[in-house]
Amino acid sequence: MKAHLQQYLTSLALLSEADVHYSLAAFSPISIKKGNFLVRQGEVCDQAAFIVIGGVKSFSSDKTGNENIICFRFENEFTTSFESYFFRRPSPKSIQAIEACVLLRITPARLRNLLERIPAWDIILQELVRQELIAREKYLLAYHNKPAREKYLLSLQQAPDLVRRVRAADLASYLGITERTLTRAKQEAR
């Protein structure tokens, strides 16, 4: 199970083989069922997770309970509520499994230990935050102020796996449209 994370860390070319093995020991495997949460909005996030199998959605809920999905994460990606995890504040978002997941989790205390023992982990964290910022920027540039049909076609082109794996209601929320509008966009795209 940790082989996926080992490959990921090795691919970064920042850690020695010994540092990779030491790092792997800091992560604990967990399984979560579809629908379960890694963190709920308003709670303090006590884990970051590397996804071995499955997928999660990150979203905030408005006062009426509507979900506003901001991203999806799948295999070989990390997920956490960065602000909550690093600054020990209530999370501004929820992270929920959209599929049964196998994750490798790391607590803030174990991550601090890695940072103290292996300085390259600071660079790894910078890279994770950089990837998160780039993903947000791409999302905004790709989907903001575009017609529904164009948003759907773009998601088909750039993220066909996403369209295949997520529920229509979740995809609609992510694209910033209603499920009904998504259905129309799919029909127009045929």
Image (cartoon, grey):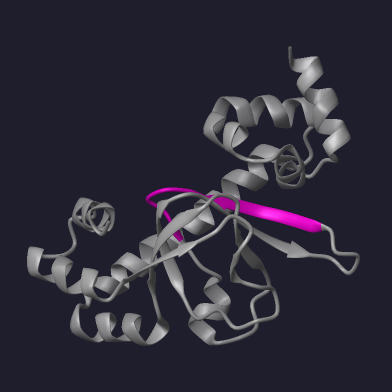
Magenta segment range? Answer: 67-78
Q: How many marks?
A: 0
Give the percent coordinates (x, y) of residue 169. 76, 42
Whether residue 125 appears in magenta in the rendering, the answer is: no
Q: Is residue 25 left or right of residue 164?
A: left
Q: Position of residue 24 (x, y in %)?
A: 23, 68
The foreground one among 132 and 5 is: 5
Q: From the viewer's perspective, is 111 left or right of 176? A: left
- Figure quadrant of residue 50: bottom left
Give residue 124's position: percent from left, percent from top. Answer: 31, 65
In the image, is residue 79 above or below residue 135? below
Task: Kindly identify the residue that appears in the image at 80 percent across and 31 percent down.
Answer: 182
Q: Residue at x 82, y 27 (%)?
A: 183
Q: Main secondary structure of the magenta part?
A: strand
Determine whether 109 is above or below 157 in the image: below
Instruction: Specify the quadrant that holds the N terminus.
Output: bottom left
Lateral position of residue 168 relative to residue 100, left or right? right
Single out the residue that lies furthest toward the top: 190
Farthest residue to the right: give it: 64
In the image: residue 121, left or right of residue 160: left
Q: Position of residue 128 (x, y in %)?
A: 41, 61
Q: Is residue 76 magenta?
A: yes
Q: Could you tell me which quadrant the C terminus lies in?
A: top right
Q: Residue at x 58, y 37 (%)?
A: 165
